[in-house]
Image (cartoon, helix red, strand yellow):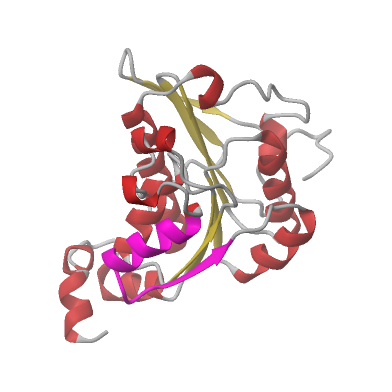
Amino acid sequence: MDDNQLLRYSRHIMLPHVEAAGQQKLMDSSVLIVGMGGLGSPVAMYLASAGVGHLILADFDMVELSNLQRQIIHGTEDIGRNKVDSAYDRLKQLNPEITVTRFKQVLDDETLADLVPQVDLVVDGCDNFDTRFAVNRACVKFHKPLVSGAAIRFEGQVSVFSNDGNGPCYHCLYKEGADEGMRCSENGVLAPVTGLIGSIQAIEAIKVLLNIGEPLTGRLLLVDALAMEFRTLKLKKDPACGVC
């Protein structure tokens, strides 16, 4: 690391669990972030500012006025732009040293088979189950850890799936045909809840990349913002799961 990098990441390097070696590991890491919405916004901004060396942003949607209540990576001037283009500009402002790749196609089994092997970890912040299941299948197939999050109304959840063959996968938690009506566009969401869940996802991603602490592997963190309560449930591998 040069002097500017030592200064930029000095608060990380001070941490006994990170230090210079851990920061270098982050700088050498690559992460696929699925969705540049309410969850993907804080995930991308924190991973970029933390120095994760290569971020692949995947989203084919355009920025709309209704997004700006919670999707903090975009601004009013970005309305009508592709979300990954808007996010790219913001991230390069935050940290011009990192590499940011934009992917604007729909994610399916074929495109994910190309993207997932390129990265060390996947963060899923999308809002539809078809994409979530496709992302999970690819992560299981290529043995990539998956940090999954969701937020709706005043509630959110986060879990980490190691996909090493020992623990559960996302499909063990949710089966095909899950309720597609559970979207913010139909139910609403409190803006800071997406920021809270996305921030937790970013923390979990860094923990997995650095192999520190106790990630939410095999556990589901449930957040009730109205009561400000946090609960953790243990997840078990489904022996009848058709994916893992």
Question: Is 78 placed left or right of 34 in the picture?
Answer: left
**95 falls in the magenta region:** yes
Question: In the rendered image of this protein, does residue 21 appear above or below residue 156?
Answer: below
**91 falls in the magenta region:** yes
Residue at 48% of width from left, 52% of height from top? Answer: 83
Which corner quadrant holds the N terminus?
A: bottom left
Residue at 39% of width from left, 34% of height from top? Answer: 194
- Examine the rendering and report whether any part of residue 211 can be seen: no
Question: Is 238 placed left or right of 205 in the picture?
Answer: right
Q: Position of residue 177 (x, y in %)?
A: 77, 26
Q: Position of residue 34 (x, y in %)?
A: 56, 51
Residue at 34% of width from left, 68% of height from top? Answer: 92
Residue at 33% of width from left, 54% of height from top? Answer: 46
Read off the magenta span. Answer: 84-103
- Examine the rendering and report whether any part of residue 110 can be seen: yes
**Viewer-proximal residue, 219 or 184?**
184
